[in-house]
Image: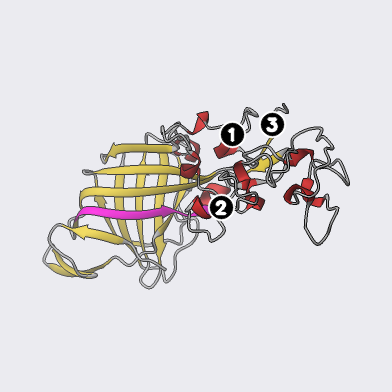
Amino acid sequence: MRKIFFALTTLSLLTYSACDDGDVLDVEFDFDDEFSVCTGTNGLVFYKTKNDPSESLSVRISEINSLSEILAVGDDNIFADTLSLSATNTFNYRTYSNTSLPSDLFCNDIPNSEVRILEDYEATSGYVIIRTELTEDDNDGIPAILEDRNGNGDLTDDDTDNDGIPNYLDADDDGDNILTKDENPDPNGDNNLDDAQDTDGDGIPDYLDNDDDGDGVLTRDEENESQDNNPANDITNPDAGPDYLNPEVNTTVSATSYRAHNITKAYKVTLTVYDIDLRVISFDVLEFGTLDDSEISNSLKSETLSPVFN
């Protein structure tokens, strides 16, 4: 479990002693890397908590009112915004007398009466950068950034099968009715597609090849056992595998349509705080962390895409 990383203006230890009205305070930042988010009465609140001792870090941004706003990435699959801290955009470090903190610590219309704040240190100067990257979208095993095949930074104009759905949203990039994730685009999972499966050795990986075995019959038209838009279950010779991977079988039984597919988008949201002074400690850079995946998943719904058959 990775802990929060930060760069200090003057100190570099995990535990700090600082003076506040003549008292010596122990300031300990030992938070997990992931943070949560909720919608408050005045914008979004990004926060993380810990117990033993009970503490919290939070950033309130009044200009952003919903998580969907920071998930609205551009054509490059990136959202980035820089916001100044102020009286309405605040960074807070709080300590509590509670042994443990409740899950509803933030964003309630009525504060939890059981919570007892010992100290509340607030920074109203400095700035934060929120960055969102669409990391996966069609759940095909290929990160979105690697589906920019022409390298122009625009994912919307890469559509191998010309079905109207760009590759980064298309679970079947070559339109052969075999899902990309089932065509071994990245066998060892290292995000290097040079070793993608290429059954006929023609230099075109199976996930982009509409005739995987090179027998002259389109993969999607090798529906010899059942016309169900799934060539994977059409097997004339069990020893050789599915007909679409067996060049000895080249019977054409045309597909009737593309397979519809569901997509679930995945995002990585990070937040970084700069140039803040909390009286007890100051930071040049504070890596607030990465938004908990479940926070994003709960705000998204799966989509069903139906390609245009041609």
Quick one: label 3 or label 2, which is nearer the N terminus? 2
Q: Residue at x 51, y 28 (%)?
A: 157
What is the CA distance from the residue labelled 1 to the residue labelled 2? 16 Å
Which residue is situated farthest in the right direction here?
Answer: 225
Q: Position of residue 29 (x, y in %)?
A: 29, 65
Which callout, 3 or 2, points to the residue nearer the camera? 2
Dot 3 crowding, Cα within 10 Å, few <14, some 14–19, many 20+: some
**Residue highlighted by disc 2:** 196
Q: Nearer the viewer, residue 134 or 90?
A: 134
User: Can residue 157 be seen by looking at this rendering?
Assistant: yes
What is the CA distance from the residue labelled 3 to the residue labelled 2? 24 Å
Secondary element at image label 3: loop
- Mark number displayed over residue 160: 1
**Quadrant location of the N terminus in the rendered image:** bottom left
Q: Label 2 near label 1: C-beta < 8 Å?
A: no
**Residue highlighted by disc 3:** 307
User: Can residue 118 be seen by looking at this rendering?
Assistant: no
Which callout, 3 or 1, points to the residue nearer the camera? 1
Q: Nearer the viewer, residue 117 or 10?
A: 10
Q: Position of residue 156 (x, y in %)?
A: 51, 30
Q: Position of residue 271 (x, y in %)?
A: 35, 48
Residue 9 picture quarter: bottom left
Q: Which residues are magenta?
A: 283-294
As shown in the figure, which amino acid type bears the numbered disc 1? Thr
Secondary element at image label 2: loop
Residue 288: in magenta span: yes
As shown in the figure, which amino acid type bears the numbered disc 2? Ala
Figure check: 99 above or below 171: below
Q: Position of residue 127 (x, y in %)?
A: 25, 42
As shown in the figure, which amino acid type bears the numbered disc 3? Pro
Quick one: label 1 or label 2, which is nearer the N terminus? 1
Secondary element at image label 1: loop
